[in-house]
Image (cartoon, grey):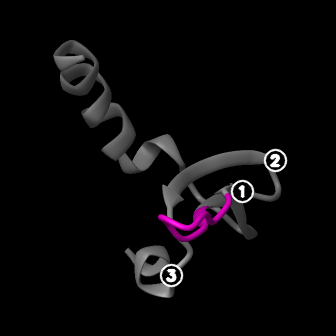
């Protein structure tokens, strides 16, 4: 896993990986339903609508995380 992190982090963080996005789609999905011991867990995806390409995915659905 260390090799994956060392090799992958610079690739993921490179701003050229995404390029120019003219139309951004944002969608949230619940991927683990609530139980008595935890709340529903969500994932939010960011999509370049012109290229139909997922450009980012993160856990949660809060605006603060989306701005980051």
According to the image, label 1 marks what residue? 48
| Magenta region | 33-42
Q: Nearer the viewer, mark 2 or mark 3?
A: 3
Majority secondary structure in the magenta region = loop
Q: Nearer the viewer, residue 42 or 16?
A: 42
According to the image, label 2 marks what residue? 52
Q: Nearer the viewer, residue 24 or 58?
A: 58
Q: Position of residue 20 (x, y in %)?
A: 59, 58
The circle on residue 38 is none
Q: Nearer the viewer, mark 3 or mark 1?
A: 3
Q: CA distance from mark 1 to mark 2?
A: 6 Å
Q: CA distance from mark 3 to mark 1?
A: 20 Å
The circle on residue 62 is 3
Which quadrant would residue 21 be assigned to in this image? bottom right
Mark found first going from the N terminus, 2 or 3? 2
Disc 3 element = loop
In the rendered structure, are the residues bearing label 2 and label 3 in contact, judged by CB atoms less than 8 Å apart? no
Compared to 52, does 45 lie above or below? below
Q: CA distance from mark 2 to mark 3?
A: 23 Å
């Amino acid at each position: 896993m260390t090799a994956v992190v060392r090799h992958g982090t610079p690739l993921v963080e490179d701003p050229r990986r995404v390029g120019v996005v003219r139309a951004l789609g944002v969608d949230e999905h619940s991927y683990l339903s609530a139980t008595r011991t935890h709340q529903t867990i969500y994932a939010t995806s960011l999509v370049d609508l012109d290229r139909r390409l997922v450009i980012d995915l993160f856990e949660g659905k809060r605006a603060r995380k989306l701005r980051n």
